[in-house]
Image: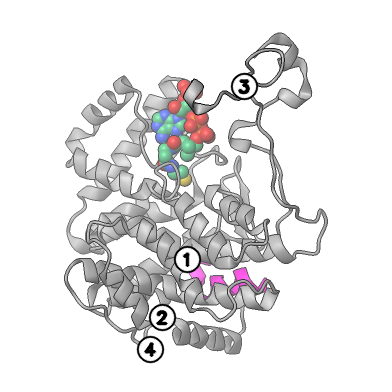
Amino acid sequence: MTETQSQHPDSIINTGLRGVKVASTRISHVAGSEGKLIYRGYLIDDLAENATFEEVCYLMLYEKLPSVRELGAFSEELARRRAIDPEMIAALKTRPSSSAPMDILQAGVALLANHHTHPGLLTRGNELDIGMTLIARMPTLMAAFDRIRNGKEPIALDPDLGHAANFLYMLTGTAPDPEIARIMDICLVLHAEHSLNASTFTARQIASSRAHMFASVSGAVGSLSGDLHGGANARVMEMLLEIGEPGAVDDYIRKKFESGDKIMGMGHSVYRTKDPRARILQPMVRKMGERTGEPKWYEIASSLETKALEAFSEKGKVDIHANVDFYSGALYYQMGIPVDMFTPVFAISRISGWVAHVIEEQFAEAAPKAMLYRPSADYVGEYCGPEECSFVPVDKR
Ligand SMILES: CC(C)(COP(=O)(O)OP(=O)(O)OC[C@H]1O[C@@H](n2cnc3c(N)ncnc32)[C@H](O)[C@@H]1OP(=O)(O)O)[C@@H](O)C(=O)NCCC(=O)NCCS
C-alpha cells in the first residue's frame, strides 16, 4: 500500500470486520471482556441450568420465555413437524456414504424448500413457519443420514421424547437415559445463539437480499462447517484422540508451538476471557468421564488447556482461552456420536439463532433499518496503462 493510499480513509480495509457494527439486535449479546453471554436479556449460565432447548427456541422466536401452555403448544408443534418426507429419505439414500454430513445438511436445507408451499413468500409469518420446520427437521435429517450411511433404516421419531432426546433416539435407535438427554439438551441451549458470528452474519447477509429462510440457513450451514468456526469441535476431538493420554500433552504442545499450528478450540474473536460456555461444559465433561469410566478425555483436555494457557502467556498472548468447542467434543464422543456429526449437532442448535436473526434482518422496525449488504473492496488488480486493458481477441493472444 502506498503512503497516499494509506492516508486516504476510503483505503482502510477492515479484514474480518472486527468491531464493525452492521446491525442493531435484540437477540443476544456477547460481552467479550467480561466473558458473558446473554440471550434476550437472560444470562447463559441461568438458561443452561434451568431452561430446555425448546424454551430457548421459543425465546429466540417470540422474544419471551413461554408459559407452561405456550411451551406445551410449541413442543407439540415441533413434534408435528419433525418427520421428513419419504422423497427426502429417498434422496439421502442416493448420496455416497462418504459424503460429509455438513454438506448433506447444507444441501438438505435447500432441498427442504422444495417441500414447502411458498418458500419465497417473504412475510414474517411464513419465515417463522419455515424457521419452525427447520428447527424441527434438521435433527431428523442428520440422524437419518447417519443411519443410511451405516446401512441402517432411518427411525421414526418418538412422540414421547423431547427435542434433544429425540435426536439421540433417531441417531442411535435407543431412547437415551434421561441424564444423557439432559446433557444433550444443555449442549443445544449453549450453542443456540452467539450474535454476529460468521454463520449468523452469513444468514443475515443472504437474508438482506430478500432471499428466503431456506437460502439464508443453507448458506449459514456452509459457513459453520469451516474449521475456524463450527468445524473446530470435530478438530478438537481429533486432537484429543491424537494426544491419546494425559502424559502426552506436553510433547504435543511443544510440537504445535514449534510448527506454529493453532490449538483448536482455543482463541476467540470476541472473548478475551474463557468462553462462558466452556466454563459450563468443562465440569460436564468431568462428570461424563466419571459416568463412562473413561476420565482420560477430561484429563487430556483440562491439562491441554492449562498448559496451552501457560505457553500462550510466555509468548505474551494472555487473551487466548478455551472456547465453546474445546470441551463439547469430548461430551459428544462419550455419548457415542460420530466425530463428523459434532458440527451438525452445533447446527441443529444454532438454527434457532439463525432463524431469529433472519427475521430480525428482514422485519425489524427499529432504526437503523437494514439494507442490502454491499461492502466494497480495494481494487489492486491490473491496469494495462493509464486506462483499462484493451481487449485482444482470443486468436491474437
Ligand atoms: C477463533 C479465531 C479464528 C479467532 O481469531 P482472531 O481473534 O481473529 O485472532 P487471530 O486468528 O488473528 O489470532 C491472533 C493471534 O493469536 C494466535 N492464535 C489465536 N488463536 C490461536 C490458537 N487457537 N492457537 C494458537 N495461536 C492462536 C494467532 O496465531 C495470532 O498470532 P500472531 O498475532 O502471532 O499472528 C482463532 O482464535 C482460531 O483460529 N482458533 C482456533 C479455531 C477455533 O477454535 N475456532 C472456534 C472459534 S469459537
**Residue at the spot of label 4:** 159
**Residue at the spot of label 2:** 162
Instruction: In the rendered structure, find residue 110 and report the number of the disc placed on it.
Output: 1
Instruction: In the rendered structure, find residue 305 and report the number of the disc placed on it.
Output: none
Which residue is the extreme one toward the right?
367
Q: Earlier in the sequence, mark 3 or mark 4?
A: 4
Quadrant of residue 247 in the image? top left
Q: Earlier in the sequence, mark 2 or mark 3?
A: 2
Of residues 308 and 118, the one nearer the viewer is 118
Question: Disc 2 to disc 1, how far (Cα)?
Answer: 25 Å
Numbered disc in front, either 1 or 4: 1
Magenta residues (range): 46-65
Q: Residues within 10 Å of mark 3 (few under 14, many from 20)?
A: few
**Residue at the spot of label 3:** 380
Image position, residue 260 (x, y; %): 35, 23
Question: Disc 1 to disc 4, how far (Cα)?
Answer: 26 Å
Q: Residues within 10 Å of mark 4 (few under 14, many from 20)?
A: few
Please indicate whether residue 336 sits to the left or right of residue 368 in the image. left
